[in-house]
Image (cartoon, rainbow, N blue to C red):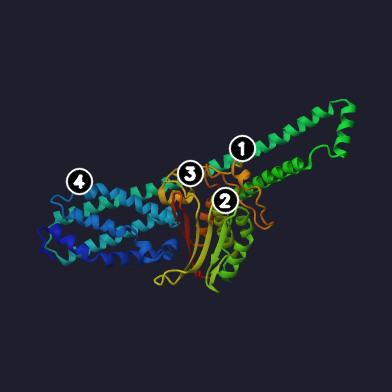
Amino acid sequence: MPVPTTEFDAVADYLRSCKETILKAWRASVSALSLCVGASLSEVEFFDHVPALLDTFENQLRQSDPCAKSVAMREFPRTAATHGLKRWQQGYDLTELVRELGQLNECVVDVIDHYTDRDPTISHESIATVRRVWAHFTTVGIEESVGKYAFLQREEARGQVQDLEEALAELRSLEAQRGDLWQQAAHDLRGNLGVVANASVGLTHSTLAQPARDGFVRILIRNVSSLHQLLDDVTELARLQAGRESRRVQSIDVTPLLHELCEGIRPVALGKKLFLQCAGPAGLGAQSDPVKLRRIAQNLILNAVKFTQTGGITVKWGESDPEDPGHWVLTIADTGPGFPSKSGLPIANAMESVPPLTAGSTSTGDQQGAEAAAPATVQPKIIDSGAGEGLGLSIVKRLCEILDATIERHSLPNEGTTFRLRFPKTYAGA
């Protein structure tokens, strides 16, 4: 290691040597605060961009004038904002985010104080400058991280408002259709008795072609079913947002639950000439809420079926990475068109921070998928692939928060989308 040329270099060298100590002390202090999401993350996920933040602080101290703006200082806000984005992905609430950043500040200040005790010869001016630079980093870090988190929170809320507006618009449309039918019926009743009689005879002798009659009935049933499902989703999301859903954990075997779900959805995929493959270990024991787990998987698989036009969907589950024995993983991959870079999914917001879109339209998706008859136990979501992904993934995100699960999305245009969900194997107190 080169000999320090200034007191600031000496402090920077000490901070580098203490980086692992700072990170471990930070995680221990966060765990002591019982921040539930942070405690469920692996070290790699928890530390995230914080080592880069510490490196930027160290590099700033090595400048000839640590208080002056530098390339490191200009890049720091972007790095801090990425931390807020990652915490959004991982399911933190805003209070947890602020508290953990406060704990990081305390850990770094402790190390600076320890250096002062270790080297009493350092000038008061130099240590005051070190503290001032770190205070600036802390302020900018909290501002940018919280700002990014708050932006994503607002964007998700905006998307949910748009979803609700779409649901109400569809309700008004259906009411208008029903009003038109009653208006036409009133017009017919105003006709003369002879016309009524002739119409009755015509219906008796089935003058209207049965295929046309059946086609109208099928379309009506599909639209009512779509609206019913969308309103159910709105109600479910509102209940989740209000905190009225609780986690009901029990010991389960994940494998038969997911096999049964895939078997129920497979006819929907086959109706679109898609494959639906599922694979996992013969038995995978874990603690979970089976109802919520099934709802998460069903929403994602049905969305994949809806978006995919050729190829199919692969569902896999199993143990997490060897260094993460406390979790198991569910992966759902499709060969669909992928989500564009400005897709606007609530989960895509967490990964790309783009405006959310609306859903619920049946103008195209209902027409394309109507001929595939779904089993009675599985109701496909009606989602307009040109407008957005609807409420389904918002519900998935909230359910994952309840189960302390993390979700990642990887998507390539015209190649497909993969969702990777990571669930705890056990829950404290269960």
Q: Is mark 3 on a helix, strand or loop?
A: loop
From the image, state whether disc 4 or disc 3 is nearer to you: 3
Circle 2 residue: 306
Q: Is mark 1 on a helix, strand or loop?
A: helix
- Amino acid type, residue under disc 2 in the picture: Lys
**Residue 430 visible at all:** no
Q: What element carries label 2?
A: helix
CB under 8 Å between callouts 4 and 1? no
Looking at the image, is mark 1 or mark 3 earlier in the sequence?
1
- Amino acid type, residue under disc 1 in the picture: Ala
Circle 1 residue: 169
Circle 4 residue: 69
Q: What element carries label 4?
A: loop
Q: How far apart are marks 4 and 1 (CA)?
A: 52 Å
Q: Distance between the residues labelled 1 and 3?
A: 18 Å
Closer to the camera in the image, 306 or 397:
306
- Position of residue 231 relative to residue 319, above or below, is above
From the image, state whether disc 3 or disc 2 is nearer to you: 2
CB under 8 Å between callouts 1 and 3? no
- Position of residue 429 relative to residue 370, above or below, is below
Q: How far apart are marks 2 and 1 (CA)?
A: 22 Å
Looking at the image, is mark 4 or mark 3 earlier in the sequence?
4
- Amino acid type, residue under disc 4 in the picture: Lys
Q: How far apart are marks 3 and 2 (CA)?
A: 19 Å
Looking at the image, is mark 4 or mark 1 earlier in the sequence?
4
User: How far from the left and from the top, in percent, is residue 28?
Assistant: 35, 67
CB under 8 Å between callouts 3 and 2? no
Local packing at callout 4 (Cα closer than 10 Å; few below 14, some 14-19, many 20+) is few
CB under 8 Å between callouts 4 and 3? no
Quarter containing the N terminus: bottom left
